[in-house]
């Protein structure tokens, strides 16, 4: 489509109620007009993790407010929009339904096309909210819900090179922090504790050591940390936190090392790695990724954190790209708790054991 497109996007797949508005020029240049996020950290902190029912209720209560904030911040009226996008999955289904229903209501009431967006496509395209990163690139997506290596070839063509067999990287940070009594969300708390520690005292396993492929696994690491947690005193926590942070980074890098080698022949002369997801905020991991990219001759892109973590602007962007290609969705588009980006790979790869309703992501 050769016109300028202005799209509102809603994101409610986990524990952030978010809405954003972006403008896409006919040549694909992106301008973020607003990106508003209402965090639910305070609601889930008591439980040390996201409680799906509490999240769904909070999304339902806050969707209208966050949309209003995003539209006000953008200085727009409904008549200025060309489409409404919402995350339709994968994610916690109660929350996904709250955001998707809000978007459907806006689309219906204002005669706008609906764009039902895959949350992972939003993350995959998110670096382009900050700068025009050329395609293709390798994406390391490390958040509380996802841990994947993706080859992003086009705005709707993704190949999954690796994914987690159990927990996501952020989940591992959160669960380790929980057993150490560091609070929620655990990632920033564990990083802060590690800053005061000296690594090297606590032996932790190296998951999937020597195993082919680029998949991840964090369950063994988590169990080992739980066992150490029973044997230490509070004074040992910073040292253990430092070892945990290094062990998580070691694992991410060892699998990504393989992913970059696998992707390199498919990328052409300009090789790019993008990191996204909340764990991309970790300074130790960022520094290690930068080193790895230097070793492999990749340019490294770490978008501003506000675009790495869940946000509505990335969903608006993924929706605008669909709209630009003439793709829209019906008002009965379903919420999909499981929705792999690379469906073929997810269904055919026997190394993954999908849940009852199929592969999650
Ligand atoms: O992308 P995100 O905001 O939400 C999800 O889609 O999950 O990621 C949240 C995750 C949490 O697990 C949080 O502990 C982790 O990102 N995180 C960090 C850091 N900041 C946030 N993990 C490690 N180090 C950090 N500095
Ligand atoms: Zn996410």
Image (tube, helix red, strand yellow):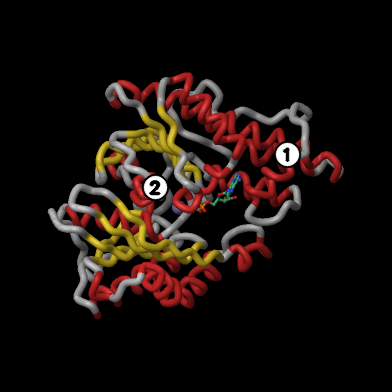
Q: Position of residue 73 (x, y in %)?
A: 41, 69
Residue shown at the point (29%, 75%) measured from the top left: 77
Residue 186 seen in render: yes
Residue shown at the point (85%, 45%) measured from the top left: 234
Q: Position of residue 298 (x, y in %)?
A: 41, 25
Q: Is mark 1 within 8 Å of ligand 1?
A: no
First in sequence: mark 1 or mark 2? 2
* 255 and 326: which is toward the camera: 326
Tell me which corner region of the image, top left, top right, bottom left or bottom right, holds residue 353: top left
Residue of label 1: 195
Q: Which mark is residue 149?
A: none
Horizontal arrangement in the rendering, residue 40 relative to residue 158 (left or right): right
Q: Nearer the viewer, mark 1 or mark 2?
A: 2
Q: Residues within 10 Å of mark 1 (few under 14, many from 20)?
A: some
| Depicted 225 relative to depicted 27: above or below | above
Residue shown at the point (72%, 49%) measured from the top left: 179
| Depicted 22 relative to depicted 63: above or below | above
Q: Position of residue 256 (x, y in %)?
A: 47, 29
Q: Position of residue 196 (x, y in %)?
A: 77, 39
Residue of label 2: 130
Tell me which corner region of the image, top left, top right, bottom left or bottom right, holds residue 176: top right
Q: Quadrant of the N terminus?
A: bottom left
């Amino acid at each position: 489509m050769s016109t300028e497109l202005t799209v509102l996007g809603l994101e409610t797949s986990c524990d952030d109620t978010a809405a954003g508005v972006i403008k896409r020029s006919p040549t694909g240049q992106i301008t973020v007009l607003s990106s508003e996020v209402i965090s639910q950290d305070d609601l889930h902190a008591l439980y040390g993790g996201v409680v799906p029912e509490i999240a769904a209720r909070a999304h339902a209560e806050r969707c209208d407010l966050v949309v209003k904030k995003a539209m006000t911040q953008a200085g727009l009226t409904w008549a200025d929009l060309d489409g409404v996008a919402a995350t339709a999955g994968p994610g916690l289904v109660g929350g996904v339904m709250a955001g998707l229903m809000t978007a459907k209501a806006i689309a219906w009431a204002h005669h706008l096309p609906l764009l039902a967006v895959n949350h992972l496509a939003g993350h995959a395209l998110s670096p382009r909210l900050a700068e025009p990163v050329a395609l293709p690139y390798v994406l390391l997506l490390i958040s509380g819900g996802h841990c994947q290596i993706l080859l992003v070839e086009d705005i709707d063509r993704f190949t999954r090179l690796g994914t987690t067999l159990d927990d996501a990287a952020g989940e591992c940070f959160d669960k380790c922090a929980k057993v150490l009594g560091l609070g929620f969300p655990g990632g920033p708390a564990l990083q802060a504790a590690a800053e005061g520690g000296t690594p090297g005292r606590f032996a932790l396993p190296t998951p999937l050591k020597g195993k082919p492929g680029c998949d991840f696994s964090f369950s063994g690491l988590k169990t080992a940390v739980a066992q150490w947690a029973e044997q230490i005193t509070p004074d040992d926590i910073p040292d253990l936190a430092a070892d945990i942070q290094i062990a998580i980074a070691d694992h991410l890098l060892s699998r990504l090392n393989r992913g970059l080698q696998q992707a390199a022949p498919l990328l052409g002369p300009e090789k790019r790695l993008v990191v996204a997801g909340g764990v991309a905020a970790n300074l130790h991991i960022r520094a290690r990724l930068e080193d790895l990219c230097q070793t492999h001759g990749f340019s490294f892109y770490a978008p501003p954190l506000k675009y790495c973590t869940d946000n509505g602007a990335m969903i608006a962007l993924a929706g605008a790209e669909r709209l630009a290609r003439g793709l829209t969705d019906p008002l009965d588009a379903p919420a999909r708790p499981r929705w792999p980006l690379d469906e073929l790979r997810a269904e055919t790869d026997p190394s993954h054991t999908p849940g009852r309703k199929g592969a999650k992501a």
